[in-house]
């Protein structure tokens, strides 16, 4: 069980890195008011006025689904490597 918790921690850290990179790339591409949903499911609502720039960030169900799918794939690959290692 301990090895699965370690893999969960590593997988979650990798997902967070992917999520933050996607967020940074998308944030610097915004040049007008509007709503953008990133590839990893972060919704960015931006209002640009001559005086200020307001951004509202929220998660979508897409983020939860993709995180769960990422974990399933991670553990499937990990399990396959464990089976191959044992053989």
Image (tube, grey):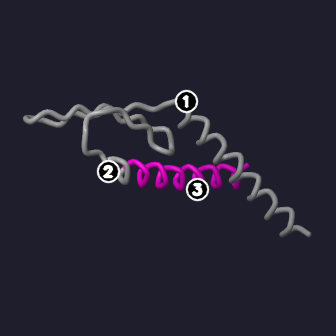
* Disc nearest the viewer among 3 and 2: 2
Q: Which mark is residue 29?
A: 2
Q: Report the Cα–Cα distance between label 1 and label 3.
A: 22 Å
Residue lying furthest left? 51
Can you give x and y, in whole percent of width and height, for residue 38 in the image? 45, 43
Q: Residues within 10 Å of mark 2 (few under 14, many from 20)?
A: few
- Left or right relative to 36: residue 9: right
Q: Report the Cα–Cα distance between label 3 and label 2.
A: 29 Å
Q: Which quarter shows the C terminus?
A: bottom right
Q: Which mark is residue 8?
A: none
Q: Which residue is mark 1?
A: 61
Q: Give the residue displayed 66% in from the left and 43% down from the top.
A: 69
Check whether the beta carbons of the residues at disc 1 and disc 3 lie within 8 A of each other.
Answer: no
- Left or right relative to 29: residue 12: right
Q: Give the residue displayed 74% in from the left and 58% down from the top.
A: 78
* Viewer-proximal residue among 3 and 8: 8
Q: Quadrant of residue 6?
A: bottom right
């Amino acid at each position: 069980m301990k090895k699965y918790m370690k893999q969960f921690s590593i997988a979650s850290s990798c997902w967070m890195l992917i999520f933050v990179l996607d967020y940074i790339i998308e944030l610097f591409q915004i040049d007008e008011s509007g709503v953008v949903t990133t590839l990893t499911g972060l919704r960015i609502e931006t209002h640009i006025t001559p005086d200020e720039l307001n951004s509202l960030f929220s998660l979508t169900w897409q983020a939860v689904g993709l995180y769960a799918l990422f974990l399933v794939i991670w553990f499937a690959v990990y399990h396959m490597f464990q089976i191959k290692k044992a053989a």
